[in-house]
Amino acid sequence: MESKQVLTNYVATFVQSLIAQGVEHVVISPGSRSTPLAYAFKHVKTIKTYLHIDERSAGFMALGMAKSLQKPVALLCTSGTAAANYFPAIVEAKNARIPLIVITADRPHELREVGAAQAIDQVNLYGNQVKWSVDFPLPDAQASTNQFLTQHITRMVQTAVTAPRGPVHMNVPFREPLLINLEEKFAPVSSVQSFPTRNSVLPETLKEVQTIMKDSTRGIVVVGELPMNTNSEELLKALEKIGWPVLADPLSNLRKFTHECVIDQYDSLMKSSSFTSRITPDVIIRIGAQPVSKPLALFLSKVKAQAVITIDESAQYRDPFMWTTHHIVAAPEDVLSKLIYTGKHATLPIWIQANQLATSKVMEYASQHEDEGTFAKMVVDLLPEDSILFASSSMPIRDVDTYFLKTSKNIDVLSNRGANGIDGVISTAIGVQLATEKEVTVLIGDLACLHDANALLASKYNNVKLTVVVMNNNGGGIFSYLPQKAEDTHFEDLFGTPANIDFLPFAKLFGADYQKVSDKDALRQSFLKETEFSIRFIEVITNREENLLSHRKLWSQIDEAIQHV
Amino acid sequence: MESKQVLTNYVATFVQSLIAQGVEHVVISPGSRSTPLAYAFKHVKTIKTYLHIDERSAGFMALGMAKSLQKPVALLCTSGTAAANYFPAIVEAKNARIPLIVITADRPHELREVGAAQAIDQVNLYGNQVKWSVDFPLPDAQASTNQFLTQHITRMVQTAVTAPRGPVHMNVPFREPLLINLEEKFAPVSSVQSFPTRNSVLPETLKEVQTIMKDSTRGIVVVGELPMNTNSEELLKALEKIGWPVLADPLSNLRKFTHECVIDQYDSLMKSSSFTSRITPDVIIRIGAQPVSKPLALFLSKVKAQAVITIDESAQYRDPFMWTTHHIVAAPEDVLSKLIYTGKHATLPIWIQANQLATSKVMEYASQHEDEGTFAKMVVDLLPEDSILFASSSMPIRDVDTYFLKTSKNIDVLSNRGANGIDGVISTAIGVQLATEKEVTVLIGDLACLHDANALLASKYNNVKLTVVVMNNNGGGIFSYLPQKAEDTHFEDLFGTPANIDFLPFAKLFGADYQKVSDKDALRQSFLKETEFSIRFIEVITNREENLLSHRKLWSQIDEAIQHV
């Protein structure tokens, strides 16, 4: 067989094997060595291709797609440092349990580590940060090679989507010439059909948990970030039936339900010792990732509960405080739907009342003050039905935690909380937008926005529609809340780090609509303004110092309001 | 001892151990977990600190510093994806043999892989891409802990600077609280003094090489990129004495000598089969990295020389063509200075004549035509004495290869050729500028410039002075020279990838002086214009199609000119 045909068969099998395993999206970065696969992806109609010239942004774009779809999404780049640029997104995918399929083209073995151009050691390039890494064979005419491709790709994609989900790495070497035959129709492969499974909780486990719950009078459920494909309605139904207070992180997406057992103000409540002393939980049921709220974490790490039952699809359950006493490896909704609480709950009314008082205070405060938090509330309130809010790590997700009150509007809140990085935020949001085709609004600080500036290059190559709201407090706002703030020496140099950036040219560079505001009215008008631009960029001028004081003021007002619950 | 004092002693020892091993520069990115070391670096006066908010750019900045100084330079960031952003620079450092000291702060063991915020698995994070990775102990009051720090840091920095030089990784966990005592003076540590050594060639090796050379009549020396601390004058003196044609890559920095044995036009000469058939070398001496020139590589890979003697400080000598017959692990200048050629060279006059003809043709062509190559020549010709040209991978370094004619001006040419990435180019150049305090000019294409856009944020935090000349051909120009160009389908989508960027807002964003030119006169005027801006940005509008044709035209004219040598 001539070599062009061998190469064509190889990439046809490769791509068709991915398709057979449900891969529908691939983000490609330009390069030469990846040519055969790039052509092959473009050639098959069942795959949607996206382009980004910066592999770091491309990585996060694919992450955003896989995150919002909860399906495997592929990445393709050429050999060399291109592959290294995927690393931040891969680390986030590993920790956030996102099924990324990372495909790096490589030089053949004879050009590796011999000083050849653009050849680095790509075997196991990402170390422990991927679930599995395979160095693929070169294309050849052996039937077993293509069988190997299909079998391996099937198992690798299944590895990526099996709990705990995560990234896998396919390193694929090619020899020149790199052109394939584009006249040919790629025949589907017959691959092993993979049937989805999930762990089912055993009757005796349920019985034991029920016994623990029965004796509880002050139980709570703490819900962190859940995968986007969680059936929230079913989950809430199960939780309502149990009837315990449900501390719902904004990323749990349980705040789309207004049921009174959903507690959304615990971040402020936990700062109040008069409150926490009255509700000390005796049993805690934990599902999802670690919640955003630090006050909650601090409080719970001190509680000596009789039982902390963590339900997590993975054996690597998440519990930095080492307070878990019981662990069930299963999907939370499967377990919870089977639990019935037969005890008598003593503190639910207190939780509900305190939550209502705190909510009123937050609403009152927001109507009277202007700071990053109340700006965030304005954005949240203006979000259109059935849209997505993507909140950056650092301050935005914390402001969302306070100001995203439970609502019957269908808003999904997303954030990169695997490693809590401020990198790749806009790129991830773009991936979410491209995959869901919903309206997506990003809430982000100035430094995170600059860090991921290249994200917006995506709009030059793909049909992106995005609103970016930048809270520009000229530097790293979150550090003001840390003890470092007390040490004046070097504070601005090391933590404040003001960039003194004018975001007008930033928006212009990417052909975005630009509006600059510094009060809520202007923010409202800007947000509601009709525009023809595909990217809207709203810069909100805020002040780090004032912001810190204002946040503290709200917390103390809430503390006061709930003194007599 | 109270814990703040324990922490202070730990970081004092850490930083003083680095200083004892010659570390003078550290690039810091803001973050919380790295606070103790960040303060410690700021606190000691013998260390110069630099700041960048994007760790990817920070990594390349430190790379540029270490590259130009050939000394270890440190990097410091917080835990999480921040550390992953260093990866591209680390991969380049490994392949380009640059002694980067990568310091990542980490969470303590109890917060690792338990779902804690901003905690990822950082142990051996960079896998094979670093020479050594150590997970440091937590600060404690044991004397042996601080002894361990000094001993380990000493050996790690020595590992980084010993051939083949390369990056090392120090992962350093800290528990809260993170503040140190800044009243305290950090006492220098007494560390093992490390004496530099280098391999010395044995007399019997020299004798054997001399015998091989004696019988040669058509020997050549091929010189790729050499470390910046190479004594070029001594090296050239040794090469002159041998008297063979010296094919000098622009990154060899041997083109600062106008001696006639220095051949700088081999890239064009190697495209001419009438020429190559007349000079077929019988013995080749190879020093430095793989040269940029692809025609040279293609020609040499086909030559059946009697001997190819590769001199490389490392056992991992670089030879993608597997043509080395003899290998000496030593510094090239040490070996060459001891060699005497006693044979009779037959082809030297042909080399010299062809090189002169090609040079005339290049000069004539440059005076009559305008393309990216002749624009590059204009820039090269205008470079001030004792300055540095940083050429991007992809087309710029290739144009420099053709148009950087040997000159007695003291210009150093640098490029990232470890992995030949187009990422981090401007950041690296900024590192070079900050470390050398020389005038630095960057020659770069539009995509590479956009890829590393964040580089220029460095100017917001550090005293950067830089001229960036962007060849804007609206896309990936190099792909037009590859076979992919013949396959029209998807070419622009996958390889051309025009970004349609207006670089005026780009320059404005970073507060840079901006000039846009499209001919040589305007380029000259722009380049020579006095400006008060610390960053000058010159956009040169070129055309991918015309550029391809123009390059081909020059090559065919040179081929014609040397037909009758």
Image (spheres, coloured by chain):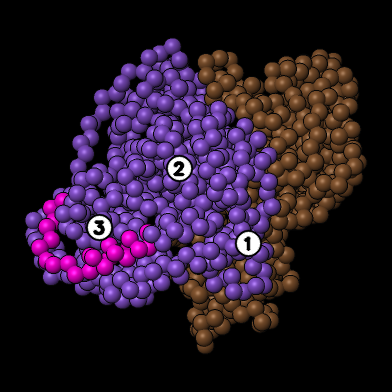
Chain colours: A purple, B brown
Disc 1 chain ID: A
Question: Is the residue A191 above or below the residue A427 in the image?
Answer: above
Q: Note whether residue B21 is visible.
A: no
Query: Which residue type does callout 2 highlight?
Result: Leu
Task: Name the residue tied to disc 3.
Answer: A261
Q: Secondary structure at mark 2?
A: helix
Q: CA distance from mark 2 to mark 3?
A: 25 Å
Label of residue A423 in the image: none
Residue A208 position in % (x across, y down): 11, 64
First along the sequence among labels 1 and 2: 2
Q: Secondary structure at mark 3?
A: loop
Crowding at dot 2, Cα within 10 Å, few <14 / some 14-19 / many 20+, comes out as few
Q: CA distance from mark 1 to mark 3?
A: 40 Å
Q: Is residue A355 magenta?
A: yes
- Please provide the residue range marked out in magenta: A336-359
Disc 2 chain ID: A
Tags 2 and 3 touching, CB below 8 Å: no
**Quadrant where the C terminus of chain A is found in the figure:** bottom left
